[in-house]
Amino acid sequence: MQLEHAEFLVRDQSKEAQQLMLKYIAATKATGELPLLNRKTYARALSAGRLGD
């Protein structure tokens, strides 16, 4: 999982992308769930073209 997190963070170097990735990792750690497995979250992400705020 640590390797996956590290690879996830280096994929996009923009400041906004880095912040969103860190937020995603923190949420996953806090809840123990993968956000995109939630149908409503997945639908919002598809509609917005991004995950999160």
Image (cartoon, helix red, strand yellow):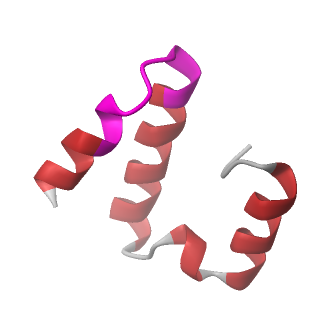
Q: Is residue 29 left or right of residue 34?
A: left
Residue 35 against residue 14 in the figure, above or below: below
The residue located at (58%, 22%) in the rendering is 16
Image coordinates of residue 10 in percent, x first then y, are 30, 30
Image coordinates of residue 24 in percent, x first then y, are 48, 50
Image coordinates of residue 8 in percent, x first then y, are 33, 44
Task: Identify the image quadrant of the N terminus.
Answer: bottom left
Between 39 and 32, the one nearer to me in the picture = 39
> Which of the 4 image quarters holds residue 33?
bottom left
Residue sitting at the far front: 11
Query: Is 15 inside the magenta-drawn segment?
Result: yes
Between 47 and 25, the one nearer to me in the picture = 47
Residue range highlighted in magenta: 8-17
Q: Is residue 11 left or right of residue 49?
A: left
Residue sitting at the far right: 47
Task: Identify the image quadrant of the C terminus.
Answer: top right
Image coordinates of residue 22 in percent, x first then y, are 41, 38
The residue located at (37%, 33%) in the rendering is 11
Residue 12 against residue 28 in the figure, above or below: above
The residue located at (87%, 59%) in the rendering is 47
Tell how many labels: 0
